[in-house]
Image (cartoon, helix red, strand yellow):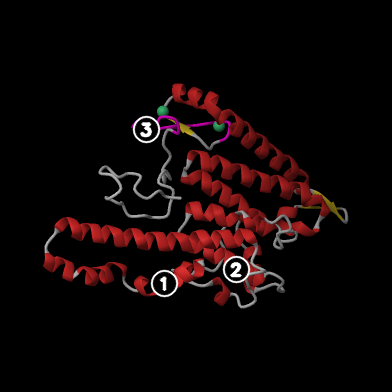
Amino acid sequence: MGVIGVDSPHGTDKLPSYEGKDPFFQEEPWCVYCHSRPAAGLRCCSGCHTAWYCNQTCQKAHYVSGHKEICLLVAQDVKRVKKYAAPLRKMRVNDVLEDYFETQVGDFGQCPKTQMYLAARHALMDTYETAASEVKIQEVYEKALFHALAVLRLDAEDGIETRYVAPFILLNLHPDDDAFDFIRYWMKVSGQETTEEFWVRLQSEEGEWTYPREKDCRFLNIYQEVPAANEHNVPLAFLMAILIIKLRIVATYDATCRSIDLAFQTTGGRRIHMIQNAVKDIFLGDRVKIIENQRQQVE
Ligand SMILES: [Zn+2]
Ligand SMILES: [Zn+2]
């Protein structure tokens, strides 16, 4: 979550705009220890591929100051996924060798022999998410998302409940619309027979995003989007993710208003104040009209 006023050089009365994202989030890797980006480039930790360094001194310092634990865990989880995947690539079915990753996509949840693999892959996703929350680098969140989407493709019914983790990866990574799209999809298919999107997911590439995207859907009300949903049957994880989406919208709006107010206060002059509301309307557009609705959804 972003922190209002954190970069303020003049105290709390100068508010930067609030984007709702972690202010430390990095689209490009940097040295996770000293936060530099040397021209000579960075080296990636060969143990986990989730941390980058400018030199060995930073790498060693980071390793002993706490990276060791997650580094070993990533390596161990990657190994376990490979170990459980290997036999599934050559399963003997009616005396014919079958690659489950080609023939059983979507049905992994139904098959007892794939359970250990699914659990290992889910654990790897979790570990990448933990690593990402430490280094705040986009590529590491993307690794977590890749494995989440891959598990949801292999086990279309999601018996191990990967769907409750994915929205929080998305909230760190993508526009919040994706998180809303994802939740709406899973709310709609819950208890339903297979839908068109379901088949699209099974035919997708590993880790591919197959959920229907709608621009600005984060403003929508989940209870209106999914008529079967009510305050008792929306899973807690989804409810929390939606709450974060809504709070970000309200907070962004409030911060923008304050920035505009502040700009006018510091420019001074009575006539400027007269056009203040008109300017707010230009900047915020239709969002002014629906922001009260967002506040109500939060409540
Ligand atoms: Zn460094
Ligand atoms: Zn490492």
- Please indicate, yes or no, whether residue 5 appears anywhere in the rendered image: yes
Q: Residue at x 71, y 58 (%)?
A: 155
Residue 80 is one of the magenta-drawn residues: no
Looking at the rendered structure, the number of numbered marks drawn on it comes to 3
Q: CA distance from mark 1 to mark 2?
A: 25 Å
Q: Earlier in the sequence, mark 1 or mark 3?
A: 3
Q: CA distance from mark 1 to mark 3?
A: 42 Å
Q: Position of residue 152 (x, y in %)?
A: 66, 58
Residue 38 is one of the magenta-drawn residues: yes
Above or below: residue 221 compared with residue 85: below
Q: Earlier in the sequence, mark 3 or mark 2?
A: 3
Q: What residue sits right under mark 2 in the picture?
A: 185
- Asked if the residue at label 3 sits under 8 Å from ligand 1, the reply is yes
- Asked if the residue at label 1 sits under 8 Å from ligand 1, the reply is no
Q: What residue sits right under mark 1 in the picture?
A: 292
- Please indicate, yes or no, whether residue 200 appears anywhere in the rendered image: no
Task: Give the residues in magenta.
Answer: 32-48
**Residue type marked 1:** Glu
**Frontmost residue, 17 versus 266:** 266
Q: What residue sits right under mark 3 in the picture?
A: 36
**Frontmost residue, 133 versus 290:** 290
**Frontmost residue, 196 versus 233:** 233
Q: Earlier in the sequence, mark 1 or mark 2?
A: 2
**Residue type marked 3:** Ser
